[in-house]
Every structure is written in C-alpha cells, then in structure tokens.
Image: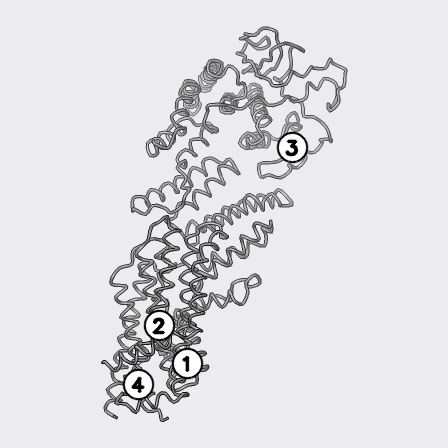
Amino acid sequence: MKKDRIAVLAGVVVLLLFISALQNNIADQRREEKFRDPNAMPLDMIAQLPVQDMSLVTIGAILGGFRSLAVDLLWMKCDNYWESGRWFRMLPLARTITRLEPSFVEVWYLTGWQLAYNMSVEAQSIDECRRLIYDGIEFMETGSKLNPEHYRIPFEIGWTYYDKLNLYDEATTWFVESIKRLDATLIAGKYPKEDNIPRYIERLPAHGYERFPDFDKALKWYHVSLMKHRQYDNISPGAIETILERYWPAWKIFKQARNAYHQRRYDESIARLQEAEAQLLRDWVKWQPNDPIDPFALHFQARIYELMAAAAEGKGDAQAAARYYDRAFDLWWECMNERAMDKLARRRLLDLYYSRGKPEKWKQRIPRGMNPYGLPEDRVVGETEGTAPPRPQGDVSLAPTGKYRYRCLKCRARYGANEPDLTRCDRCGGPVVREEAETPPVPVPKPGIKMPGMGGPGMGAPPSAPAPGHEGHAH
Amino acid sequence: MSTIFAIAKSTFKETMRQRVLLVLLLFGVVTVASSVLFSYLSTGEEIKFVVDMGLGAMLIFGLLMATVLGAFMIPTDVERRIIFTILSKPVRRMEFIFGKFLGALGTIAMNVVLMGIVFLVVYFLKNKFHLELTAVEAVGLVFFQLAVILSIAVTVSTIATPWFTVIFTMFTYFVGCMNETLHHIATHAQSTFTRLSMWVLTVLVPHFENFDLREKILLEDPVPGMYLVKAIAYALAYIAVMMAFAYLLFNEREF
C-alpha cells in the first residue's frame, strides 16, 4: 500500500512537470499564432476600467473567462444608448469595450463615426465641434493600428475626411491603406464575411480629385477601379468619358500654365490660363448647354483664377492679382451658394478670405448658416440681421424680363432674353448657356424701390432657386 | 476493466435521469438557439455574437452540470450507503472512482453533443451556410474543458461535503481563467516566496484558456492539428493527476 502511494505520488510529480512544460509550449504557440488578441487588456488591469456602466454580472463574466460575452453585452448596451440618442453615455462604454477586446472592429469605426457625425453636431462651439470630429478620427486611427489587417477602419477614416471635411488628399491616403489591406486579405484567400464590402473604394479618391480638381489623379483612380471591378463598376467608364470630353483639353493647357508658373514664366502662365479658361468654356457650352452650374467646371474655373492671381503676384501686378482673386472668390461663392454640401467651396472661400487679410469687400459674403463642421457659423463683425449678402460683381441682371433665362459662363451674369439661341454675353462676350428654370424668373426691381426681404435699393434680386443638378455624371 | 465500465454504465443511466441536469440541458439548448435572435440586437458582426453566446452558454451550463454532477455523485452514494454495497464486492476503490468519473463524463459528453449540435446548426445558418472545422474543434475542446472541471469536482468530493466541492470547483475555475495574471505575478513579484507560491499555483490550477478557440473561429483561421493534440494531452494529463489525487484521498477514507 505504501509502495502504491509512493508510486502514485511519483507519477503525479512527473505528470505535473509534464503539464508545466506542455503549458509553456501551449502558451508560446497561443501567443505566436494569435489565439487571443495580444492587445487585449490583461485581467490584472481590470480595475482601471470605468465600472459605472457595468453590472456585477458583467464584471464577473469578464473575470470568469467570459470576456467576449461580456463585451457583446456591453456593446448591446451601447447600441441601446445609441438608439435612444444618448451618444455621450455610449462613449466611455465603447472605450471599455475596445480595451477589453481591441479586435472588435465595429466598435472602433462606429464609435468614431458617432463622434465625428452625431456628437460633433451637438457641440456648443465650433472648437468643440472640430475637436469631436478629430477625436473620432484619432479614435479610429488607434483602432486601425491595433487591427492592422482589417480594411474597414481606414476606409471609415478616409470617408470621414472625404465626406465630413472634404480633405481629399488625406482621404485618399486612408483609402489607399484600406485598399492595400483588402487586397492582402483577398490574396490570402480570406474574403471578408461582411455582406456589404464596398467595391467603390477605388472610385472615392477619383470623385474627390474631380472636385479638387486634379483630373490626372481622378483618371488614374477611375482606371484602377475599372481594372479591379470591371463587372461591378458601371460608373467609371462614363466618368472617364466625361472627364476626357469636358475637362481634359482645358486641363492639359492648365498643366502647361502651371509648369510655366513654377518656372517663373508668369506672363506665359497667365496667357495659358486664359486659354485654358476659354477652352473650358467652349467645352462647357458644347457638352452642357443647359447646365451653368457644373460644380467641377466651376471649381476648375476658380482654380484657374487662383493660379492667375498667383502668377500676377509673381509678376508684381497687385491690381491684376486682386482682380483675379475677386473672380476666384466669386466663383467659390457661387459654388457654395448653389450647393449646400460643397464644403470644399466653403473652405476655399474661408481660406481665401483669411489668406488675403480679410478684405472688407468680402466680409459680408463669408458663409453664414452651417459651417463645414455642421455648426452655425460665427457671425462676421458688422453684419446685421436680415441683410441679404450682395451678389457677386458679375452676377447682375442685365435685362428685367425675357422668355428664356441665360447665364454667362465667364462673368456669371444672369439675364432674360426672348431669343432661344443666344450664344454670347452682352456684357463680356463670353459664352452663355440657357438655364432650365422651373419657376418664372424673378423680376429685378428698379433702382430706388425696396422689395420685401432685401437690404436696400440696388441690392439686386434675391437668390434664385438652384438650377437642376447634373445628370449622367458620377459623384 | 469490465468493473469500471459496469460502474460507468450504471452511473450514466442514473445521472441521465436527474431532473436538474435535464433542466440545465434545456436551458443550455434554448440559450444557444436564442443567440441567433440576440445577434439581431447587436450592431455589426452578428456571427461574433452567435459564437460568443453559443460557446459561452455551452460552457456555463456545462460548468454547472459538471460541478453539480461531480460534487453530489459520490457523497450521495456515501449518504445512501450504496457505497458499502459496491465496495463489499471485489471492486477496488480506484475502479469505483474511475467508473463514476467515466459515467459522469458520458453524461457531460451527451449534453455537450446536444448543445453542440444546436450551436453548429445556428452557426451554419448564420455563417451563410458554411461550417468551419474550427467551430467543431471548439465544441470538442469545450468537452475536454468540462472533463477537467468534472475531475476536480470528483476529486474534491471524495473528502469534502457537496457544497464545499461546488464552491471549491467554481473557485478553481475562476482562478484557472486568471492564470495569465498568476503567471505575470509569478514572473514579476519581488518576493521569492510569492513567486514560488504563484508558480506552484499556476502549475496546480488548470489553464482553461488553452481550450478557447473563439478568436480563431471568428477569423476563420484553421487551428494547427498539433495544437489540438497538445490541448487534449494537457487535459488528459490533468485528469490523470486529479484521478491520482482522488485515489490517494479516497483510499484512506474510512466509512
């Protein structure tokens, strides 16, 4: 009996040593092959979590090896807060979840989205709003670092830059990262399980660069998208064709002008830019005879004038530079007015205003209403309530009535005429297009007569209804 | 050998009739099946919810079953004096213990199979009619995890009261889930005594995270065959240690 006991004890000791050695081996293998998220918070640090939103059951579950289940329950609670609009309560819980289970990807990008979109709109000041948007982006960047193989988080960061901030270069950097990760996953044979894997990621930089505009990069990304998703992408062929028809001839000349500018050949640069504008307007009339509010063309036109102004400054011609900056400002102002979602125009307007030393003549036309961050813009000093902003210099009505409404593409003048096929502007000789107005034109008051809603005599007609949007062009 | 199997068979039949276990099984199956409904309440990856809740429910209810079975099996026999009848036959105490353990293990296996089938069906439906081998392997490792818990409960029940056994087994399970922390203390504590005692604890208390394949299921990563062999070898070695302790303790016990 005693011998049996000794034998059994010896066997137990041997087995325990074997178990110890085997356990080390298993632990090493688990670490190397990532059986567990290496970034997950260790249990001995659990006291650092904010426990006010966690019940004892949840804490017990975390300690008892049911961490994933506890995380799921906490996420359901977050979902509850989200549905009931209590976004700020959701935030500490979301941070807890990301510490317990950093590989739970949805938490990262959904919380980042909440910060950048929902919470920022509820901010009490523009600074807070801006901070919340960038907090959302930073939150997602942390998630992206901790999940280096997952494509979705960099995609969402890129989308936030693209959609919320209209910062296309930053957006493209993140879209490229997302594409790299998605391609790596596909090459490894692990197709993401989601139902809605975006097949348009490659096209998003193209859409952004069209607006900038930078048609070289836009075409490049459209071609990449077409190469990768030919059977799904029915937008890129049309978009490429549109760019080549409507903007490419002018863009080629613009690039020559830009090269000349960089080589300090300012006169040549200005001459080429004027050629580029003329080409742009010719193509505009040819391809879009009924659409005077093409945002891409307007953005392009504004960029042409910005570069003209820079070249004029380089030449030392301050007067010409000021004129060109005024034109650029007018064009951005028109873009912003016509399309409320054109945050790029709004931002360029603000950039020009501040970079030119806040000229008085522009002060009253600085954007009011929602700013790029979704908050009411601060009022510019000197504004009064109910004052309608003056229309741009070029935007004057030359004739009070007319069966057809026209807009000059060069000076942006608007007027009515009875001829159905006007081609040249009476004021500047530039090409005109006919607007397809849905409402009758608003009569222009005679000088000295005040109409309701207007600041005073000679202020011009109130803004008209926006022209119909593009059709047949990718956005 | 035949004695062990005879005891195992009768234990199995007896435990399968226990209402407590049937209720736990029913709850377990319902919880696993309802994970598909709960997944709709979760924003994002529904499959994660199904896997976490399915495997979690199997583990929770399996843990309760193993603890209750292991804690009450032998003391009940002692209380009802059935053990005298058995031990008066030419049945060695070790055969009795091992037979009881195998019988209870059979019951646990049956329950795991039932809950596992429900889980795999739910997973199959939720995963776009695709079944990963990793999910089946995870169910298998749940069984081995519960086998380890059962062996602890059976061993302690040879000398302790049932409720003490339940509490001790649950406590061991929680400590086993925190083995990472113990290992961390064992390697970083300043006091030699603390380091040594923590090391002994990490060796004696089983590492239940060895049996966790949740991350691999969600990533659809295959589990290396060698890892499964090591995890099962670990479980079997631990069970052997527990059975050895049970033999040492039960052999000395007087009735």
Q: Furthest-top residue in view?
A: A419
The kind of residue tagged 3 is: Arg
Between label 3 and label 4, give the one nearer the viewer. Answer: 4
Q: Secondary structure at mark 4?
A: helix
Q: Nearer the viewer, residue A213 or A285?
A: A285
Give how far across and how far down residue A187 sits, in percent. Answer: 29, 44
Circle 2 Cα neighbour tier, 10 Å, few/some/many (<14 / 14–19 / ≥20): many
Mark 4 vs 1: CB contact within 8 A = no
Q: Chain of mark 4?
A: B
The residue where tag 1 is placed is B72
Circle 3 Cα neighbour tier, 10 Å, few/some/many (<14 / 14–19 / ≥20): some
Using the numbered discs, state the Cα–Cα distance from disc 1 to disc 2 in whole angstroms: 14 Å
The residue where tag 2 is placed is B107
Using the numbered discs, state the Cα–Cα distance from disc 3 to disc 2 in whole angstroms: 74 Å
Of the two numbered discs 2 and 4 on the same chain, state the one appearing first in sequence.
Answer: 2
Q: Furthest-right residue in view?
A: A449
Taking the image as shown, residue A388 lies to the left or right of residue B42, namely right
Task: Name above or below for residue A95 compared with residue B25.
Answer: above
Using the numbered discs, state the Cα–Cα distance from disc 4 to disc 1 in whole angstroms: 18 Å
Between label 2 and label 4, give the one nearer the viewer. Answer: 2
Give how far across and how far down residue A354 sits, in percent. Answer: 59, 32
Q: Chain of mark 3?
A: A
The residue where tag 4 is placed is B247
The residue where tag 3 is placed is A368
Q: Secondary structure at mark 1?
A: helix
Taking the image as shown, residue A291 lies to the left or right of residue B165, namely right
Q: Nearer the viewer, residue B52 or A377?
A: B52
Mark 2 vs 4: CB contact within 8 A = no
The kind of residue tagged 1 is: Phe
- Whether labels 2 and 4 share one chain: yes
Of the two numbered discs 1 and 2 on the same chain, state the one appearing first in sequence.
Answer: 1
